[in-house]
Image (cartoon, coloured by chain):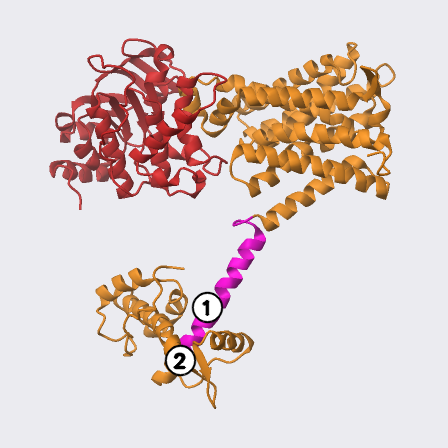
Chain colours: A red, B orange
C-alpha cells in the first residue's frame, strides 16, 4: 500500500470553488443528555480552519457525542452548532462525516466502490444515479487513500485499516470543506494510520478544517495543530503544545492515575514512540 | 401452458404466486440486509387487525382500504416495538415480540368475532388459499384476471418503482444510517417507507401464503441470495428468482402430492436456503469441508516426506504406515518426489527440497519456542508438528535470524538449510 498519494499534475482540486478565509465550526453552549443523563455540559468552542484539529479525552468523555451533536444525530438539550455561521441544514454538502468503523455492518453486500460513491450522493440529489464522472472521481479518491486496486471488492474482505480508508475516501468523494472523523485510528494498522494522517494533511493544505476525535494522546502531539481536551465539559482548547500540559491532563484524566502518568511522560517526550 | 397439459386455473394460480413472491423477495432483501427480518415477521402478523378493521369499514379484501389499514398497523407495530423498548426498558426484540403477537391476536379475535358480518375467512387469512386464487376474478379489458394476480402485480410494480426511485438513498441508509442522515438523506422517512412496503406486500402475500407463512416469502429468498452474491442489486435479483422458482415448484409439488400449496412453497424455500448454505462459494459448508480435506491431505503428504528425510538422517527408524500415508506415497511417487525401494520408500532429489523445507520449519519453530517460551523439551514437538505446514519462506527467514541458522534445534539436531524449493508464503 502506498502511503499518502502524492499530488500529481492531473489531480482534481478537492474544492468546488475558491476558498473563503477558512472554515469555522462554532459550538455555542452545547449540552447533550442521553435518557436524562447529561453527557456534555455547556461546551463553548470555536474551531477555525484550515487545521487538523483533535478532540481528545478519556473514554466516555463525550467526544463522539460532540460530533454527533454537531451533525444533528443526537438532539441538543441546549445550545447550537454553526458551520461558517450557518446551521447544518444549509451547508450539509460542505460537511463530511466519517463515523466509527464499528457502527456499520461490514458484511453488508456492497463493494468498496459502492461505498465511496455514497459520498457523491449529496451533490447528485434525488433520482440521479452516479455516472461515469462520479465513478472516475470516486476512483481518484480511492487512489488517494491507496486502495485503487480494491474498488470491486466486497467491503467485508478488507482489513480494519483498509475499511477505515474506504470511509475516508467516501468523505473525500463528498468534496467537503469541513471533515468530522470519529476515532479514525481505532483498530487501524500503522501503515493505514500514516496514510490517513497524510491525507488529512493534504486536506489542511487545501484549506479544509479536519476535526478528529482521537483517544491516543501520544500521536495527538505529533499530528494535531490544535486540540480540545474534553471530559464532559471543555477542559482546555488551543494549540496542541499549549493545551497538553500536565496540569490540563491532570484535570482531564483525574480518575485514571495510571493513564495520567503514562500520558505525562509521553507528552514530555514530544509524542515520539518507538 | 395450457398446451403443456396445465389447467389454465393452475397456470393463473402459479402466476399469482410468482408475482407475489417477487414483490416479497424485493422488500425482504432490504429487510434482511438491514438485519430487520424479525420486524418483517412482526409486520406480516401485526397487519391483521388493520386489515380486519378496514374490511369491517367496507373495504374489499385486497383493496386500497385494506392496504391503508395494513400500513397503519405496520407503523403502529414499529412504533410500539420501539416505544416498549425505550419506555418500558425491555429489549427491542422483546418489545417487538409483545407488540406483534398482541396485535395479531387482536386480529384473530376480530376475525372470529365478526366472521358472520365480514367477507373475511380466518382460514384464508392464516393459511392462504392459493389453490382458489384463480376463481376470484375481475374483468380487465375483456379478460377475466384473478384478483390476487392483479393485486400482486400492482404491488410488485409499485414496490419496484419506489425501490428504483430511491435505490441509492435506501442503500446508503441501510448500510450507514448515521452518515446518511448527516448527508441529508431522510433516513426515518425511508424506514417508514420500507415498513409500508412490507405491509403492502404482506397483504398481497396473504392470498398466497397466509399470515403465518408469508414471512417465508419475505425473508428466506433474500437470506439464501445473500449467501450466494455480495452486491445488493444482485441479492435482490437472485432473491426474486429464488422466490418465483420456489413458488412455481412448490405449487406444482403440492398439486401433485395433494397438499397445502403455501406449506409446500415454504418447504421448497427452506430447501433452497439449505442448498445455498451448503454450496455457497467460499463460505458454504461444502466449500469449507473441501478446504479442510485438502489441508488434511497436504499435511499427510508433507508428513510423509519429512518422515523419509528423518529416516535418511537416521533420527527416525520406521516410516509412517497406514492407509493415508500409503496413498500419499503413491501420489508423491506419481509426481516423482519419492521412489520405491526394496524395504519401502525413499526421497528423490526433487522430493528432498520439499522435505527439507518441512523439517527446517519444524526445527526452527522448536528452536524459537525453546528460546522464547519456557516449555519442557518434550512439549516443543507437538506445536511444531502443526506449525511446520503453515509457515512460509519469510517467516522462516525471520525465525532463522532470531535463533541463528547454523545452530541445531533444542534436541541437538541440525536445522537443514533453506531450499530453493521452499514455499514462498503461508498456504
Q: Do marks 2 and 1 share a subunit?
A: yes
- The quarter of the displayed image where residue B388 is located: bottom left
Mark-to-mark CA distance, 2 and 1: 19 Å
Q: Most extreme residue toward the bottom, as rendered? A: B342
Residue B107: x and y in percent read 74, 21
Q: Residues within 10 Å of mark 1 (few under 14, many from 20)?
A: some
- The quarter of the displayed image where residue B217 is located: top right
B299 falls in the magenta region: yes
Location of mark 2 (residue): B348
Q: Quadrant of the N terminus of chain A?
A: top left
Marker disc for residue B299: 1
- The quarter of the displayed image where residue B14 is located: top right
Residue B184: x and y in percent read 42, 17
Tell me, yes or no, if residue B247 can be seen here. yes
> B357 and A238: which one is in front?
B357
Residue B233's place in the image compared with B333, above or below, is above
Judged left or right of residue A36, residue A242 is: left
Region rendered in magenta: B281-307
B282 falls in the magenta region: yes
Query: Closer to the N terminus: mark 2 or mark 1?
Result: 1
Amino acid at each position: 500500500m502506498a502511503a499518502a498519494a502524492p499530488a500529481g499534475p492531473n489531480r482534481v482540486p478537492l474544492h468546488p470553488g475558491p476558498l473563503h478565509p477558512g472554515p469555522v465550526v462554532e459550538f455555542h453552549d452545547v449540552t447533550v443528555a442521553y435518557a436524562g443523563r447529561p453527557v456534555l455540559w455547556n461546551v463553548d468552542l470555536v474551531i477555525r480552519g484550515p487545521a487538523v484539529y483533535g478532540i481528545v479525552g478519556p473514554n466516555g468523555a463525550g467526544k463522539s457525542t460532540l460530533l454527533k451533536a454537531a451533525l444533528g444525530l443526537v438532539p441538543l438539550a441546549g445550545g447550537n452548532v454553526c458551520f461558517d455561521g450557518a446551521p447544518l441544514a444549509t451547508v450539509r454538502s460542505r460537511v463530511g462525516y466519517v463515523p466509527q468503523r464499528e457502527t456499520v455492518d461490514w458484511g453488508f453486500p456492497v463493494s468498496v466502490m459502492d461505498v465511496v460513491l455514497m459520498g457523491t450522493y449529496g451533490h447528485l440529489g434525488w433520482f440521479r444515479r452516479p455516472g461515469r464522472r462520479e465513478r472516475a472521481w470516486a476512483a481518484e479518491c480511492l487512489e488517494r487513500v491507496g486502495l485503487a486496486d480494491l474498488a470491486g471488492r466486497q467491503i467485508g474482505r478488507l482489513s480494519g485499516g483498509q475499511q477505515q480508508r474506504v470511509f475516508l475516501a467516501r468523505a473525500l468523494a463528498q468534496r467537503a470543506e469541513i471533515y468530522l472523523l470519529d476515532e479514525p485510528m481505532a483498530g487501524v494498522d500503522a501503515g493505514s494510520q500514516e496514510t490517513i494522517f497524510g491525507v488529512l494533511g493534504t486536506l489542511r493544505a487545501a484549506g479544509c478544517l479536519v476535526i478528529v476525535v482521537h483517544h491516543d494522546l501520544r500521536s495527538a502531539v505529533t499530528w494535531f495543530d490544535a486540540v480540545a481536551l474534553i471530559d464532559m465539559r471543555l477542559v482546555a482548547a488551543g494549540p496542541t503544545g499549549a493545551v497538553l500540559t500536565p496540569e490540563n491532563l491532570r484535570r482531564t484524566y483525574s480518575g485514571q492515575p495510571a493513564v495520567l502518568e503514562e500520558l505525562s511522560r509521553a507528552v514530555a517526550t514530544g509524542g515520539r514512540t518507538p | 401452458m395450457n398446451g403443456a397439459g396445465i389447467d389454465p386455473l393452475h397456470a393463473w394460480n402459479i402466476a399469482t404466486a410468482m408475482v407475489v413472491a417477487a414483490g416479497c423477495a424485493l422488500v425482504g432483501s432490504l429487510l434482511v440486509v438491514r438485519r430487520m427480518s424479525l420486524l418483517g415477521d412482526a409486520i406480516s402478523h401485526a397487519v391483521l387487525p388493520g386489515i380486519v378493521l378496514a374490511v369491517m369499514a367496507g373495504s374489499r379484501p385486497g383493496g386500497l382500504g385494506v392496504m391503508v389499514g395494513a400500513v397503519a398497523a405496520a407503523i403502529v407495530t414499529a412504533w410500539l416495538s420501539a416505544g416498549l423498548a425505550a419506555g418500558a426498558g425491555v429489549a427491542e426484540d422483546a418489545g417487538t415480540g409483545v407488540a406483534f403477537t398482541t396485535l395479531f391476536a387482536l386480529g384473530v379475535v376480530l376475525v372470529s368475532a365478526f366472521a358472520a358480518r365480514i367477507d373475511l375467512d380466518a382460514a384464508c387469512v392464516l393459511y392462504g388459499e392459493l389453490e382458489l386464487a384463480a376463481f376470484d376474478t375481475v374483468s380487465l379489458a375483456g379478460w377475466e384476471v384473478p384478483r390476487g394476480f392483479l393485486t400482486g402485480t400492482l404491488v410488485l410494480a409499485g414496490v419496484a418503482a419506489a425501490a428504483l426511485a430511491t435505490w441509492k438513498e435506501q442503500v446508503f441508509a441501510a448500510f450507514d444510517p448515521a452518515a446518511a442522515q448527516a448527508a441529508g438523506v431522510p433516513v426515518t422517512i425511508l424506514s417508514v417507507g420500507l415498513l409500508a412496503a412490507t405491509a403492502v406486500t404482506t397483504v398481497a402475500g396473504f392470498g398466497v401464503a397466509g399470515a403465518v407463512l408469508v414471512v417465508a416469502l419475505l425473508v428466506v429468498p433474500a437470506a439464501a441470495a445473500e449467501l450466494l452474491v455480495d452486491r445488493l442489486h444482485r441479492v435482490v435479483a437472485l432473491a426474486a428468482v429464488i422466490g418465483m422458482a420456489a413458488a412455481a415448484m412448490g405449487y406444482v409439488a403440492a398439486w401433485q402430492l395433494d397438499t397445502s400449496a403455501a406449506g409446500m412453497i415454504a418447504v421448497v424455500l427452506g430447501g433452497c436456503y439449505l442448498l445455498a448454505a451448503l454450496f455457497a462459494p467460499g463460505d458454504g459448508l461444502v466449500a469449507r469441508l473441501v478446504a479442510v480435506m485438502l489441508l488434511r491431505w497436504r499435511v499427510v503428504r508433507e508428513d510423509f516426506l519429512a518422515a523419509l528425510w528423518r529416516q535418511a538422517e537416521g533420527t527416525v527408524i520406521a516410516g509412517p504406515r497406514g492407509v493415508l500415508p500409503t496413498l500419499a506415497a503413491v501420489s508423491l511417487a506419481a509426481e516423482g518426489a519419492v521412489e520405491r525401494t526394496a524395504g519401502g520408500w525413499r526421497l528423490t532429489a526433487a522430493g528432498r527440497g520439499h522435505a527439507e523445507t518441512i523439517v527446517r520449519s519444524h526445527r526452527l519453530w522448536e528452536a524459537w519456542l525453546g528460546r522464547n517460551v519456557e516449555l519442557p523439551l518434550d512439549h516443543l514437538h507437538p506445536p511444531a508438528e502443526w506449525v511446520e505446514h503453515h509457515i512460509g519462506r519469510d517467516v522462516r527467514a525471520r525465525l532463522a535470524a532470531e535463533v541463528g541458522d547454523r545452530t541445531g534445534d533444542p534436541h541437538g539436531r541440525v536445522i537443514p538449510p533453506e531450499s530453493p524449493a521452499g514455499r514462498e508464503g503461508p498456504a
